[in-house]
Image (spheres, helix red, strand yellow):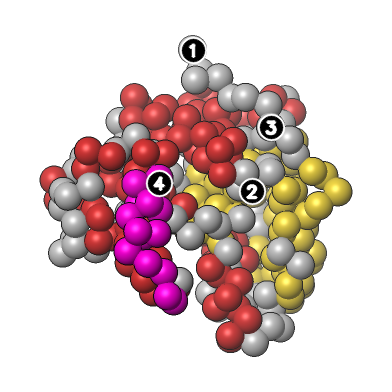
Amino acid sequence: MEKKQVNIDKNNEVVKIRGLEKSFADYDVLRGIDLDLYQGENLVVLGRSGTGKSVLIKLISGLLRPDAGSIEVLGQDVVNISDRELEALRIRIGFSFQNSALYDSMTVRKNLEFPLVRNRKGITRQEINTSVERVLDAVGLSQTINQMPSELSGGQRKRIGIARTLILNPEIMMYDEPTAGLDPITCIEINDLINEVQQNFHTSSIIITHDLTCAKQTGDRIAMLLDGQFQRVGTFDEVFATEDTRVKPFYDYNFIE
């Protein structure tokens, strides 16, 4: 499916990062990065394994603390807000984990109900049922409602993981390696689903990947992380219009004819 044009509000930064630094022992993972995510945008953070992509979204969500710099998410200072404020903010952010993070002992229905029951006090059974049916329909897996995760394919598990994230109507989506371990056809289906979520749920998204096909199909803008900094930011074609020896082999490995 070809990516449709969406309305991106470049006057509204839902994530705003300035001078962000993070090190582990003597290893500098992020070295003073700046980044904006605009309202309605799919932003791909691209880079090789071990370059700090997943560290970045852990910092954005407050799971890690930076050594220096500032992080604003939906207008709130993630570094300095209280634990209660951070917990409330995280409900507005959806996380699609690499391994889908489903509870193996629960049916698909129970997996989807869990975040609703935990975070929406006083919600009725009818409201729960409606929400579950809505997100299952959105990911095209209504028929799996009573199945166990072990009965699902890798691609189906990924879709259900995304559905469970969507059930709380997040304003921001974080996808951590959404196509990892999937066959090429299923990868295309997941890429299409990411775009459908953007269009139908009006989310702003950060997509962490080293999969160039995923980046090309889903990203309105690409930020390439190299040596702890964003060395190239722009459209897919702009980012790879270079002879930079750190960038060109990355492209050639994926797309060389």
Foreground pick, 199 / 152: 199
Query: Dots 4 and 3: beta carbons under 8 Å?
Result: no
Q: Residue shown at 40%/45% (left/top)?
A: 134
Point out the frontmost of discs 4 and 1.
4
Region in magenta? 121-134
Please name the residue that numbered disc 3 is placed on. 6
Write down the quadrant of residue 81 in the picture: bottom right
Distance in Å between CA atoms under marks 2 and 4 = 18 Å
Q: Is residue 71 left or right of residue 95?
A: right
Report the disc number at residue 204: 2
| Above or below 166: residue 185 | above
| Above or below 176: residue 87 | below
Q: Residue shown at 58%/85% (left/top)?
A: 84
Please name the residue that numbered disc 1 is placed on. 257
Q: Is residue 202 magenta?
A: no
Q: Position of residue 39 (x, y in %)?
A: 73, 48
Distance in Å between CA atoms under marks 4 and 3 = 21 Å
Q: Residue furthest top?
A: 257
Which one is earlier in the sequence, the residue at label 4 or at label 3?
Answer: 3
Disc 3 on helix, strand or loop?
Answer: loop
Q: Amino acid at mark 4?
A: Val
Report the disc number at residue 135: 4
Q: Work out whether residue 118 can be spotted.
A: yes
Q: Residues within 10 Å of mark 4 (few under 14, many from 20)?
A: many
Distance in Å between CA atoms under marks 2 and 1 = 34 Å
Foreground pick, 67 / 164: 164
Q: Residue shown at 65%/54% (left/top)?
A: 227
Point out the frontmost of discs 2 and 1.
2
Distance in Å between CA atoms under marks 4 and 1 = 39 Å
Which one is earlier in the sequence, the residue at label 3 or at label 2?
Answer: 3
